[in-house]
Image (tube, coloured by chain):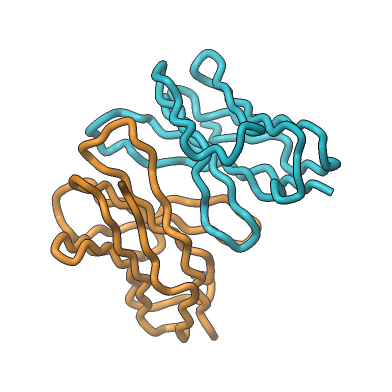
Chain colours: A orange, B cyan
């Protein structure tokens, strides 16, 4: 069975500081990994994904994430946070070898960037 | 091109009534997903359609919930005899659904906010 954990319900960071939102996963095979962001009163927007290749993935709005197979992690990072990054962030996984299986989303982490 | 659309955007109903929520996926997307998001909570998977295959209904919380997808395009999620705990935002997403490709990204609609009084 697939599962995703986001160990922090809330992350607070000062504007201009680096930010990290953590995600760990469990799949029986190799994963497809995703990050989505949900701004207040808006739908989910795709940020970035890891399918294969380079473990460091760059996405929208200056975000990046690193796939670490040994630690089964896919932490989201940004070198310098903006107040406008404040939102709810979801990590998601799908088992690459099990086509037809749905995505599993983590519980979400609320990021607050303080001015 | 148009993204995923959902209607209605808001629905207020009385306990015990039936409701239908509609999702129009992106044209050509073969995969369609329904999720439920309660206030401030994560996404709860409900049901997944992939092409002509039998849908994955493993996330439906009770037999009051059902969904269909006509002609491989528009989907309707039906909740019968609504209960107050059904109040949530119901999100629909579609994806190209091509196996083994990089086109696995889900595109989400704006959601339908359901309130059961």
Residue sitting nearer the eye, B55 or B70: B55
The image shows residue B91, relative to residue B57, as above or below, that is below
Query: Which of the 4 image quarters holds residue A96?
Result: top left
Q: Position of residue B80 (x, y in %)?
A: 72, 31
Q: Position of residue A24 (x, y in %)?
A: 30, 63
The image shows residue B52, relative to residue A75, as above or below, that is above
In the image: residue A113, left or right of residue B9: left
In the image: residue A56, left or right of residue A77: left
Instruction: Report how many numbered discs are placed on residues in the image.
Output: 0
Q: Residue at 36%, 57% (x, y): give it.
A: A4
Residue sitting nearer the eye, A65 or B3: A65
The image shows residue A44, relative to residue A97, as above or below, that is below
Query: Which of the 4 image quarters holds residue B111?
Result: top right
Which quadrant is the C terminus of chain A positioned in?
Answer: bottom right
In the image: residue B110, left or right of residue B45: right
Q: Residue at 47%, 76% (x, y): give it.
A: A82
Q: Position of residue B54 (x, y in %)?
A: 42, 20
Q: Residue at 60%, 31% (x, y): give it.
A: B23
In the image: residue B50, left or right of residue B77: left
């Amino acid at each position: 069975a697939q599962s995703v954990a986001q160990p922090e319900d809330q992350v607070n960071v000062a504007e201009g500081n680096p930010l990290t939102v953590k995600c760990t996963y469990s799949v029986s095979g190799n994963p497809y990994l995703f990050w989505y962001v949900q701004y207040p009163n808006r739908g989910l927007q795709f940020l970035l994904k890891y399918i294969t290749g380079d473990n460091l993935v760059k996405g929208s709005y200056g975000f990046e994430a690193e796939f670490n197979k040994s630690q089964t992690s896919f932490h989201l990072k940004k070198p310098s946070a903006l107040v406008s990054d404040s939102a709810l962030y979801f990590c998601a996984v799908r088992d690459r070898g099990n086509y037809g299986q749905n995505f599993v989303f983590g519980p979400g982490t609320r990021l607050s960037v303080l001015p | 091109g148009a993204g995923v659309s959902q209607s209605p955007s808001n629905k207020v109903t009385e306990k015990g009534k039936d409701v239908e929520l509609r999702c129009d996926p992106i044209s050509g997307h073969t995969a369609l997903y329904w999720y439920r998001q309660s206030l401030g909570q994560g996404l709860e998977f409900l049901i997944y359609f992939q092409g002509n295959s039998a849908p994955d209904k493993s996330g439906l919380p009770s037999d009051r919930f059902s969904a269909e997808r006509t002609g491989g395009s528009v989907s309707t999620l039906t909740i019968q005899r609504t209960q107050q705990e059904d109040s949530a935002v119901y999100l629909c997403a579609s994806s190209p659904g091509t196996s083994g490709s990089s086109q696995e990204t889900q595109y989400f609609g704006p959601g339908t906010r359901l309130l059961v009084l």
